[in-house]
Image (cartoon, grey):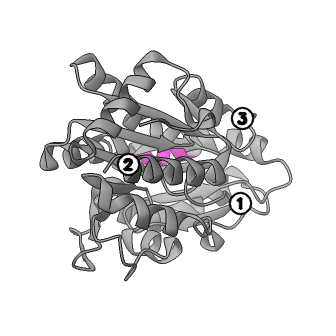
Amino acid sequence: MGMPEYVTPRTAAGREGLAALLAAPAEGAVGLDFDGTLAPIVADPEQARAHPGVVPALAALAPLVGSVVVVTGRPAALAVEYGGFAGVPGLEHLTVLGHYGAERWDARTGRITAPEPPAGVVTARAELPAVLAGAGAPAGTWTEDKGRALAVHTRRTDRPQEALDLLRGPLGELAAAHGLMVEPGRMVLELRPPGVDKGAALTAFLTERALRTVLYAGDDLGDLPAYEVVERRRAEGMAGLLVCSAPDGSEAPVRALADRADLVVPGPAGVVELLTALAAGLSRGR
């Protein structure tokens, strides 16, 4: 089963991962980040929406592989809404792991399961406005309340990187005081419980489904734990393919992933091309 040249991995391990997925798709999973991978990065995260080609591509691909799973720091309900995933024929095998796996939405049932928010997040939420004010957070700094995590964005400020550097220390102290950790991203610092990341979520999902091959696509530092899972599995003799969604490759978090990826594609549009080509290749081989 051949694949177009533009979605051919540049590494031997990546080519082996793609070949394994094409040869035994029922034993494989396609794991996808949401923001920056399925949806273009925008100044206001509430305005983020999946690329228009995402749902058709996933609807074509999902019935042909063992599982498709979206792993995101967003609440599962928002990812489902912003992705347009609910009620789409062909997406019955789609799972959304929100809050890094703390929440779960299954397309087949349409239900979300989730435990109560961690106590540390609740107390940090109450103190965060005072911490930002005391640190001199510039105009345009914006807090996104994710329920189980708190994200402070600086992309709307006049000097986003300077604002991020200014807030890194005070937010680190706030997180430490309440048993949380700070995860940096593309002009964002996220406070969340330790041990909760995309790697843990992906590991649990793959183990539950007994899936041997995994393609994982991400765009940011928050995706590195998932990359590490794929790399560990490859060291244990299983196959995997690491994809980086990099619109321009200039931002440091994207560069960190691009250097480790088997395949770099041009943002969400490139991810759509990859998913579409993969579905076409699997359909030809049936």
Image height of 244 relative to 261, above or below: below
For marks 3 and 1, give the CA distance: 24 Å
Instruction: Indicate which disc residue 141 carries.
Output: 1
Q: Secondary structure at mark 2?
A: helix
In the picture, the disc for residue 249 is 3
Query: In this orientation, does residue 97 appear?
Result: no
- Residue 166 in the image, given as x and y percentages of width and height: 70, 42
Cα distance in 3D space between marks 2 and 1: 45 Å
Disc 2 to disc 3, C-alpha distance: 30 Å
Q: How many marks?
A: 3
Q: Which residue is mark 2?
A: 282
Decide which of tag 2 and tag 1 comes sooner along the chain: 1
Residue drawn at 46 percent across, 73 percent down: 78
User: Which residue sits at x=47%, y=52%?
Assistant: 280
Q: Amino acid at mark 3?
A: Gly
Mark 1 residue type: Thr
Image quarter for residue 176?
A: top left
The residue segment tinted magenta is 171-175
Res. 170 in view: yes
Identify the residue shown where x is 53% and y is 61%: 128
